[in-house]
Image (tube, coloured by chain):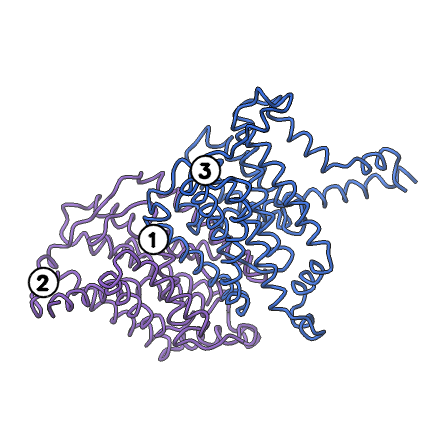
């Protein structure tokens, strides 16, 4: 039997508490803290979208950054070059990224394991090569600077919001978009469709033998994950005040993968924890040394050899151990 | 377009191809035998270049310091590779591929920053050894003697490795390990030692090619990340794990890059990645590879 305190703790809607706390940051935190929170929220969305492939479906995509980048470029080009409002540019970014994911994914899901990883990498490098060289549209190696903020005048009209900076207001927009996207992904994973994806991860041969269209499901997961990555990319382009070819270069794919695994790919909230940890660690460590990649590599080694389940996995195991220790006292 | 110009372009592609072959052959050998895709292979190449520069810097006035540097760098990198296999990689063979990929990526990050910390971020270069200075005229194009040397050493190493793999007892063991690791272990062979040896040879080749490239290209941070993607393309075209596939893969890559620049100047990068994607779609095991069971 659970103790009364434990029941109470488990009844608190923690996700809402975290959301409310995050929403309050512009009023109570500094400008820099809001900046970090924006970065965490966007990366969290990107990492959770990757985990839809990595953790839920068991597909190791080494080119997820392509869809992040396509979303960023679609949104950036629409808003800067054509003056399209954010409310249209954001869905367009999601659709654009999903469309590319559908084309690339169609070929990728025909391969397995290491070949799948290589083909996703190849496609992401194709996207990078195009973004890097197509000066007329993407700005080439100069990128696409000065992507405007969305028009947020309506937000300033609301009481309490009027004295916020534009970057703070944009953070609130990011937070709401990311929260909605996370809710959507959580529902997708919990749906019968999501269960099928887990079945495919556990045993693709058996899934095929009970009549499941394995490739079709994998492609659907690839498209959905690509679409959400596109949303993350669109938000990041505006947040970073520009879109650059670096966004699509392959080490970025590795970075988001590290976030996902650092948090724990067996848990829905794992990538969110991983993204927050990595962004905060980066901020702390770069104050002392420029050798952040070295530290990241070391973190990755510890992760692989000591905590293969990631932070959330480690915490869960730790709590279970504590629970067993306390049990005799209850009896 | 003049014929001599095209021929020069062809020779340029050939030189690129031979360098890539030296680098990618090690990558392909390790994948063929151990089924590990080693992201850190490019880092070994970069370390080979830096080590060679360091040795030349120390021995500068000595005659033949370049050759000592090349051999020394290759041996140093080989040793590092063997230690990494023993201490780190060995413990992840039973796990999913994702974890092996991530381990080798962690090495990319660590070695890249280590090189930055030791040698800084400025460009370094090594001058050509005196014996190979100058150039010769072939069909109206001037080919630097050093490039000619690379054009010869590439196939020489290819033939040497091929002979070792097919004609010696050690080579038989390696091929057996690639086919059925458990069976070989059950028959009493020391599979662990074969794996360490393979990694050592592969790192040696990476270090050697890094050292040999220094007279042609300057040494810069980031050369590791750039080269590994090119090496991936080469082994994918030829077939992951196929030795001669890697040879022909580099030949194709070199020529596509060299002539791609003439046809579509700004999209030559695009063309090689597109080639890689097409091969993976049509024949994932590459032009010369065999499907993996």
Q: Name the spot of residue A62 as percent of width and height, x first.
A: 50, 56
Which residue sits furthest right?
A331
Q: Which chain is purple?
A: B
Res. A154 image quadrant: top right
Q: Residue furthest top?
A: A163
Q: What subunit carries mark 3?
A: A
Q: CA distance from mark 2 to mark 3?
A: 45 Å
Residue A29 located left or right of residue B220: right
Instruction: Please rate how many residues cluster around mark 2, counting C-alpha atoms within 10 Å: few if below 14, some from 14 to 19, many from 20.
Output: some
Q: CA distance from mark 3 to mark 1?
A: 26 Å
Label number found at residue A292: 3
Q: Nearer the viewer, residue B191 or A23?
A: A23
Question: How far across and how far down the image is residue B12, in percent?
Answer: 20, 63
Which one is earlier in the sequence, the residue at label 2 or at label 1? Answer: 1
Query: Residue A64: horizontal and vertical position, in percent?
Result: 51, 53
Q: Indicate the secondary structure of the residue bearing disc 1.
A: helix
**To which residue does mark 2 refer?**
B142
Q: Quadrant of the C terminus of chain B?
A: bottom right
């Amino acid at each position: 039997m659970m103790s009364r305190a434990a029941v109470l703790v488990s009844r608190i809607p923690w996700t809402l508490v975290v959301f409310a706390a995050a929403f309050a940051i512009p009023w109570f935190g500094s400008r820099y803290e809001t900046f970090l929170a924006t970065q965490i929220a966007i990366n969290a969305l990107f990492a959770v979208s990757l985990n839809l492939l990595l953790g839920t479906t068991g597909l190791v995509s080494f080119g997820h950054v392509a869809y992040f980048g396509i979303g960023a470029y679609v949104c950036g080009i629409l808003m800067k070059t054509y003056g399209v409002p954010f409310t249209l540019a954001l869905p367009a970014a999601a659709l654009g990224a999903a469309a590319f994911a559908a084309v690339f994914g169609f070929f990728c899901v025909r391969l397995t394991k290491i070949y799948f990883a290589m083909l996703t990498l190849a496609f992401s490098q194709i996207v990078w090569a195009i973004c890097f060289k197509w000066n007329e549209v993407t700005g080439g190696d100069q990128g696409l600077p000065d992507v405007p903020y969305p028009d947020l005048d309506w937000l300033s009209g609301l009481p309490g919001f009027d004295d916020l900076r534009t970057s703070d207001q944009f953070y609130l927009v990011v937070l709401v978009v990311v929260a909605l996207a996370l809710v959507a992904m959580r529902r997708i994973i919990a749906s019968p469709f999501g269960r099928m994806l887990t079945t495919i991860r556990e045993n693709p041969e058996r899934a095929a033998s009970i009549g499941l269209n394995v490739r079709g499901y994998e492609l659907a997961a690839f498209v959905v994950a690509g679409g959400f990555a596109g949303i993350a990319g669109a938000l990041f382009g505006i947040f970073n005040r520009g879109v650059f070819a670096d966004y699509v270069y392959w080490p970025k794919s590795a970075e988001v993968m590290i976030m996902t695994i650092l948090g724990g790919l067996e848990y829905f909230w794992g990538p969110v924890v991983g993204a927050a940890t990595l962004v905060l660690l980066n901020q702390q460590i770069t104050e002392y040394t420029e050798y952040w990649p070295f530290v990241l590599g070391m973190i990755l080694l510890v992760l692989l050899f000591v905590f293969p389940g990631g932070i959330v996995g480690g915490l869960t195991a730790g709590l279970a151990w504590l629970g067993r220790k306390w049990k005799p006292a209850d009896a | 377009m003049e014929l001599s110009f095209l021929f020069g372009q062809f020779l340029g592609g050939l030189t690129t191809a031979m360098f890539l072959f030296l680098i990618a052959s090690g990558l392909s050998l390790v994948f063929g035998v151990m089924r590990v895709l080693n992201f850190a292979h490019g880092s070994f190449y970069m370390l080979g270049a830096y080590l060679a520069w360091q040795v030349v810097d120390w021995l500068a006035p000595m005659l033949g310091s370049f050759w000592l540097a090349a051999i020394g760098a290759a041996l140093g990198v080989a040793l590092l590779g063997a230690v990494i296999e023993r201490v780190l990689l060995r413990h992840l063979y039973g796990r999913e591929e994702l974890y092996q990929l991530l381990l080798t990526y962690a090495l990319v990050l660590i070695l890249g920053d280590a090189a930055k910390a030791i040698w800084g971020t400025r460009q370094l270069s090594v001058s050509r050894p005196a014996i190979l200075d100058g150039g010769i005229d072939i069909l109206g194009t001037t080919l630097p003697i050093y490039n000619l040397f690379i054009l010869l050493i590439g196939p020489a190493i290819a033939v040497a490795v091929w002979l070792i793999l097919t004609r010696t007892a050690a080579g038989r063991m390696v091929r057996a390990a690639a086919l059925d690791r458990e069976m070989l272990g059950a028959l009493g062979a020391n599979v662990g030692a074969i794996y360490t040896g393979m990694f050592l040879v592969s790192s040696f080749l990476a270090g050697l090619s890094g050292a040999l490239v220094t007279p042609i290209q300057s040494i810069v941070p980031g050369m590791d990340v750039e080269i590994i993607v090119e090496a991936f393309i080469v082994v994918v075209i030829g077939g992951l794990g196929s030795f001669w596939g890697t040879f022909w893969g580099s030949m194709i890559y070199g020529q596509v890059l060299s002539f791609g620049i003439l046809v579509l100047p700004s999209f030559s990068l695009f063309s090689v990645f597109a080639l890689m994607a097409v091969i993976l779609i049509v024949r994932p095991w590459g032009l010369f590879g065999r499907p993996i069971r």
